[in-house]
Image (cartoon, rainbow, N blue to C red):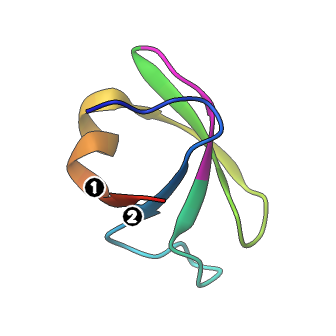
């Protein structure tokens, strides 16, 4: 799966703020993603993120 910095990801589960969309800030073995609803940033393992992606916008 090809994911680049700046891509917007739609995940299967929503963030507690209600948003399903996340922006990719960093790629590698781990990803840093930012919620498009509230701005919360998290680091997540590549394997876990790729499993939870619904679509790349």
Give above or below for 13 relative to 3.
below
For the residue carrying disc 1, how many other residues have a C-alpha within 10 Å: few (<14), some (14-19), or many (20+)? Answer: few
Q: Is residue 25 magenta?
A: yes
Which callout, 1 or 2, points at the residue further toward the start of the chain? 2
Query: Disc 1 versus disc 2: distance between alpha carbons?
Result: 6 Å
Q: Secondary structure at mark 2?
A: strand
Measuring from the top left, give residue 8's x and y in whole percent. Answer: 56, 53
User: Which residue does the numbered mark 2 point to in the structure image?
Assistant: 11
- Quarter of the view holding residue 46: top left
Q: Which mark is residue 27?
A: none
Determine which residue is flagged by label 1: 52
Which residue is found at the position 39% from the left and 64% from the top? 11
Q: Which residues are magenta?
A: 23-28
Residue 33 percent across, percent down from the top left: 60, 43
Residue contact at pointers 1 and 2, CB within 8 angstroms: yes
Of 32 and 10, the residue lying toward us: 10
């Amino acid at each position: 799966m090809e994911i680049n910095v700046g891509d917007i990801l739609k995940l299967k589960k929503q963030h507690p703020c209600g948003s399903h969309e996340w922006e990719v800030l960093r790629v590698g073995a781990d990803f840093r993603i930012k919620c498009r609803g509230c701005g919360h940033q998290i680091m997540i393992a590549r394997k876990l993120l790729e499993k939870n992606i619904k679509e790349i916008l």
